Image (cartoon, grey):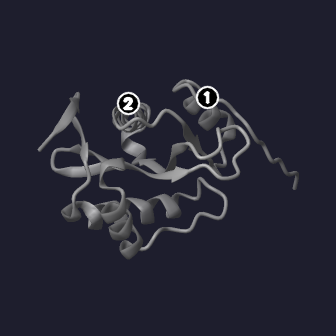
């Protein structure tokens, strides 16, 4: 298998055999209650995404178990004002790392590898959105990887 090791973490392409573990990670993410209106993705949706965008679906593996994943879709810009019209871009759909493996740069390695693969395929523009409950932390994370805030919505309870 192709991949890159980080400590005892391997970043590699997702395979059909990984889907059950990815689905379990996504379900765990939902139970953590760290995002507003989080709806876990169905197993079938993960399979469809892997079939459509296999190059942009990566996992982080430790000792034979998945501890994180990232997946994205390549789209052609129609109406996003901060991106040139008709230019392809990669939208990061999901990125998740199990709590016990956070703060070890695994999420950063997942995102860096995904952006590297996209760049090798001629994609230079990227988009991500979030519904996290810890906005300051996630903004810092994405900004540390070169992302800029474009649109912010706020609320008060």
- Residue corresponding to mark 1: 140
Determine whether, in the image, residue 8 is placed left or right of residue 116.
Answer: left
Task: Indicate which disc, 1 or 2, sits on the residue closer to the N terminus.
Answer: 2
- For label 2, the crowd category at 10 Å Cα-Cα, with few meaning under 14, some 14 to 19 and many 20 or more, is few
Numbered-mark total? 2
Q: Pick the quarter of the image with the N terminus.
A: top left
Residue at x-position 52% and y-position 43%: 89
Q: Is residue 152 above or below residue 15?
A: above
Residue positioned 65% across, 39% down in the render: 83
Above or below, 50 against 99 in this view is: below
Secondary structure category for the residue under label 2: loop
- Does residue 75 appear in the picture of this structure? yes
- The single residue placed furthest to the front in the displayed view is 86
Q: Is residue 8 visible?
A: no
Q: Are marks 1 and 2 in contact (CB under 8 Å)?
A: no
Q: In front here: 89 or 4?
A: 89
Any mark on residue 104, and which?
Answer: 2
């Amino acid at each position: 298998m192709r991949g890159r090791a980080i400590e005892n973490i391997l970043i590699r392409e997702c395979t059909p055999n990984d889907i059950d573990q990815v689905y379990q990670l996504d379900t765990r993410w939902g139970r953590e209650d760290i995002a507003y209106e989080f709806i876990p993705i169905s197993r079938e949706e993960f399979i469809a995404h892997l079939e459509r965008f296999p190059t942009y679906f990566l996992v982080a593996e430790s000792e034979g178990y998945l501890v994180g994943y990232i997946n994205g879709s390549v789209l052609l810009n129609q109406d996003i004002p901060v991106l040139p019209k008709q230019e392809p871009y990669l939208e990061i759909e999901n990125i998740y790392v199990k709590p016990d493996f956070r703060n070890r740069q695994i999420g950063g390695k997942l995102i860096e590898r995904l952006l590297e693969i996209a760049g090798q395929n001629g994609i230079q523009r990227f988009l991500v959105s979030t519904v996290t409950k810890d906005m300051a932390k996630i903004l810092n994370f994405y900004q540390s990887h070169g992302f800029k805030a474009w649109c912010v919505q706020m609320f008060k309870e």
